[in-house]
Amino acid sequence: MHRDHDPEFVEWVAAEMAQFREHVTEAANASGDQRLAVLLTHLYTEHLLERYLKAKLPKGERLLKDEFLMYQKKLDFAAALGELDNQLIDGLGKLNKLRNNCAHKFKYSMDSEELEKLGKTLGKEYSEFKEKYPNDEHGWLGATLPKIAERLATVVASAEIGKPV
């Protein structure tokens, strides 16, 4: 059975994305500051990367005990397992860079070029977001961040419930 038709799989991903929307999208919309959406999406995807590593590695929790294991290294370990597609790896890497800018540069303002690079990692879906939200960077980002998280949640779901991606 294809994973998109497996009720358990579909339910798992839907629950994950509901959690994401509740904790990330609503907070960012309430504050009006898209940097918050970037920071919270980064935090959530880091949580998903950790769950993925625990599910895929027999003693993954040992790797994650290191409090100095940064997001990029977690992404590198996850990518090395060979199940994350290159677009997702690229998108998460760009999200990490954008998060670092938002977190470490006072009064940082995201520019169109950065958002464009992040969005393009989604391919055709990003083009659809741009059509849906013409000249609306807030809308593009608001659609792009959950889609990147959803793609990672799909891989995590496969790992945790033991179904192939």
Image: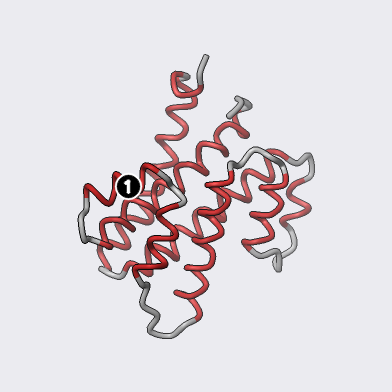
Relative height, residue 107 to residue 161 (above, below): below
Could you tell me which secondary element the residue under label 1 belongs to? helix
The quarter of the image holding the C terminus is top right
Which residue is depicted at the point 47% across and 19% down? 6
The picture places residue 3, in percent across and down from the top left corner, at 50, 23
The residue lying furthest to the top in this view is: 1
The residue lying furthest to the bottom in this view is: 106
In the displayed structure, does residue 20 sit left or right of residue 78? left
- Total marks shown come to 1
| Image coloring type | secondary structure
The picture places residue 164, in percent across and down from the top left corner, at 61, 26
Disc 1: which residue: 127
Looking at the image, which is closer to me, 19 or 78? 78
The picture places residue 137, in percent across and down from the top left corner, at 27, 62
Relative height, residue 135 to residue 121 (above, below): below
Looking at the image, which is closer to me, 34 or 61? 34
Which residue is depicted at the point 67% across and 48% down? 78
Residue 158 picture quarter? top right
Residue 76 picture quarter? bottom right
Which residue is depicted at the point 61% across and 42% down? 84
Looking at the image, which is closer to me, 163 or 121? 121
Callout 1 amino acid:
Ser
In the displayed structure, does residue 162 sit left or right of residue 65? left
Which residue is depicted at the point 72% across and 42% down? 81
In the displayed structure, does residue 108 sit left or right of residue 92? left
**Circle 1 Cα neighbour tier, 10 Å, few/some/many (<14 / 14–19 / ≥20):** some
Relative height, residue 7 to residue 80 (above, below): above
The picture places residue 130, in percent across and down from the top left corner, at 27, 51
